[in-house]
Amino acid sequence: MLARRIIPCLDVRDGRVVKGVQFRNHEDVGDILDLAIRYRDEGADELVFYDITASTDDRKVSQDWVKKVSRNIDIPFCVAGGIDSVEAADARLSAGADKISVNSPALSRPDLINELSDTFGVQCIVVGVDSFEENGTYRVKSHTGREDQTRETGRETLLWIKEAIRRGAGEIVLNCMNQDGVRQGYDISQLKAARDICSVPLIASGGAGSMLHFDEVFKQANVDGALAASVFHKSVIAIPDLKSYLINQEHSIRP
Amino acid sequence: MSLVIVDTGCANLSSVAFAFERLGVAPTISKDANIIRTAKRVILPGVGAAPYALRNIETAGLRDTLTTLIQPVLGICLGMQILFETLTEGGEKLDGLGLIPGEVEKLDTLTLPSPHMGWNRLDIRQTDPLTKGLTEQDYAYFVHSYAAPVSDKTLAASNHGSEFSAIVRKDNVWGCQFHPERSSQTGAKILKNFMEIST
């Protein structure tokens, strides 16, 4: 049986790992490779690196650190940020990334998803969705790396997820922005709604604050993986403890 | 050359090379028929679409070389799938290298998400030098939508909606559906076992 994945997310800015609250006020949390190795050793199932400044600054993530991570890490990792063409994706994948994730550029030009999956196969194309709830409706935002540049797309989250899958997304990371960084738990009702229409792997993001939140999101929203940042970076939750706890709760988890 | 990774033009070449470097082996990446033929061991990596990888092999003039190797050969992920006789992908039927009997088809995941992506258990079916030291506690990292059915060539099976071959062998040719280069200590064990197979 497929194991539920525990995925630390490393937001990268200027070659360092940073973390903000609700996408704002970023603070430095460490060196990319140091953290990647630490999480690998602790039993992380996968790592996600988001270059959160990439789309807003039109800057590309550095091939050097992608290569360095690939050389040192023996678990899969995904690279996101500013990937707006087949060439840009190819550069990351050739440097050793297992998957690439697209967000804002796919919203600006949805054909990008088709081009990427036609070239590399659906298995390495992840679509990240930043979703914000207002008046009971979930809508997609883009360019969330910086608050002053964040845009409303007018798209409804569930419709965009369906379209992304139709176009060739092999995995969806649904980041529930209302919950991001505040550690009050994953947005179970939104993730459940997404699960119902999502035929590809679905990863929950935003809101993890305790081990119970992981148990809830796996039990109630049936997601394939749970992504978290601050609880891991700040050692609020240690991955080995989390995995033992989830195994005790009878989840399928890689020890 | 002790170990040659065939340059199939696919994206995981460097990850596979790095995995061997972590074991202290310095692999050569090549699409030169002579270098591949004289290698002590050969790795056939691959990710992405089968038509693309097979076309690269044809263009490089490597089909005859790859189908007549006598040293240990290990296909990884798509590199494993193209070892089979036929591959059905996107309604198109392709000729594989024909080194292992059988057909690669879309994995029927029933109600489970597809692609099969993540860590899954290896159900060891036959003892073999490649699977030495593996137990039911071992998980490997899979990312694929297509798979080969279980047959008498299956060394290990896995299950995601349906059962499929996770590790296969025929004579000097082995294949892993998962990515040993991304399967942590389990993967390292398999790659180390491959390097220790006597030639």
Image (spheres, grey):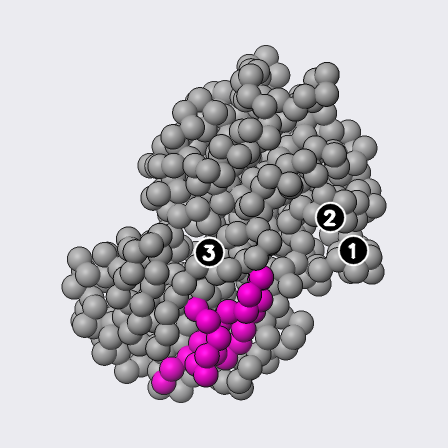
- Is B62 drawn above or below residue B153 in the view shown? above
Q: How many marks?
A: 3
Q: Please give the chain letter of the residue carrying mark 3.
A: B
As rendered, which of A116 and A49 lies closer to the eye?
Answer: A116
Q: What residue sits right under mark 1 in the picture?
A: A246
Residue B140 in view (yes/no): no
Which quarter of the rendered picture does the C terminus of chain B lie within? bottom left
Label 2, secondary structure: give it.
helix
Q: Position of residue B165 (x, y in %)?
A: 49, 71
Q: Amino acid at mark 1?
A: Leu
Are there few (<14), some (14-19), or many (20+) residues within 10 Å of tag 2?
many
As rendered, which of A196 and A57 lies closer to the eye?
Answer: A196
Q: Amino acid at mark 3?
A: Ser
Q: Are marks 3 and 1 in contact (CB under 8 Å)?
A: no
Residue A11 in view (yes/no): yes
Q: What residue sits right under mark 2 in the picture?
A: A218
Residue A167 lies left or right of residue A41; in this view the side is left
Q: Quadrant of residue B98?
A: bottom left
Q: Which mark is residue B130?
A: none
Q: Amino acid at mark 2?
A: Phe
Residue A188 lies left or right of residue A165; in this view the side is right
Q: Which mark is residue B145?
A: 3
Instruction: Tell me the distance, in whole angstroms, between the alpha carbons under discs 3 and 2.
Output: 23 Å
Q: Which residues are magenta?
A: B148-171
Q: Please give the chain letter of the residue carrying mark 2.
A: A
Same chain for mark 3 and mark 2? The answer is no
As rendered, which of A102 and A68 lies closer to the eye?
Answer: A102
Same chain for mark 1 and mark 2? The answer is yes
Q: Are marks 1 and 2 in contact (CB under 8 Å)?
A: yes
Q: Position of residue A213 (x, y in %)?
A: 79, 42
